[in-house]
Image (spheres, grey):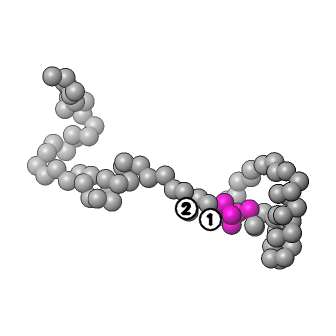
């Protein structure tokens, strides 16, 4: 697994709490931070309109339409005009 590195600053109180928890859990401070970050990110995911449409099964659902509808600009000519 390829790993990246980030650096962050924390105040003394947070650093002490992290050290205490890591020692009590028998884990490194990095392990505790990774687990906390994974937990946070799993609860705060960004859902895009694309994700919703894909899950709903409406992407590519037009039958009999041109195969290049999503890429050919000619289909957008005049779109949004009265």
Query: Residue 17 is drawn in which quadrant?
Result: bottom right
How crowded pointer 2 is (Cα within 10 Å; few <14, some 14-19, many 20+) is rated as: few
* Quadrant in the picture for the C terminus: top left
Badge 1 vs badge 2, beta-carbon distance below 8 Å: yes
**Above or below 82: residue 30:** below
The picture places residue 77, in percent across and down from the top left corner, at: 20, 25
Give the magenta-colored segment's residue range: 33-38
**Above or below 10: residue 38:** below
Q: Which residue occupies 82% across, 64% down?
A: 18
- Residue 43 shows which numbered tag? 2
**Along the viewing direction, whichever of 26 and 17 lies nearer the viewer:** 17
Q: Which residue occupies 71% across, 54% down?
A: 4
Q: Which residue occupies 84% across, 76% down?
A: 24
**Along the viewing direction, whichever of 19 and 69 lies nearer the viewer:** 19
| Residue under label 1 | 39
Please check the rendered image and state whether residue 34 is part of the magenta-colored stretch, yes or no. Answer: yes
- Residue 70 shows which numbered tag? none
Going by the image, does 15 lie left or right of 63?
Answer: right
Going by the image, does 13 lie left or right of 40?
Answer: right
The Cα atoms of the two marked residues, 1 and 2, are separated by 7 Å
The picture places residue 37, in percent across and down from the top left corner, at: 66, 60
* Quadrant in the picture for the N terminus: bottom right
Q: Which residue occupies 21% across, 40% down?
A: 69
Please check the rendered image and state whether residue 42 is part of the magenta-colored stretch, yes or no. Answer: no
**Above or below 23: residue 1:** above
For label 2, the SS is: helix
Which SS type dominates the magenta stretch?
helix
The picture places residue 58, in percent across and down from the top left corner, at: 24, 54
């Amino acid at each position: 697994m390829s790993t990246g590195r980030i650096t962050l600053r924390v105040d003394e109180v947070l650093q002490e709490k992290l050290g205490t928890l890591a020692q009590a859990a028998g884990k490194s401070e990095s392990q505790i931070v990774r687990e906390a970050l994974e937990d946070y990110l799993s609860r705060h995911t960004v859902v895009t309109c694309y994700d919703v449409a894909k899950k709903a099964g409406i992407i590519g659902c037009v039958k009999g339409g041109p195969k290049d509808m999503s890429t050919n600009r000619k289909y957008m000519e005049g779109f949004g005009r009265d």
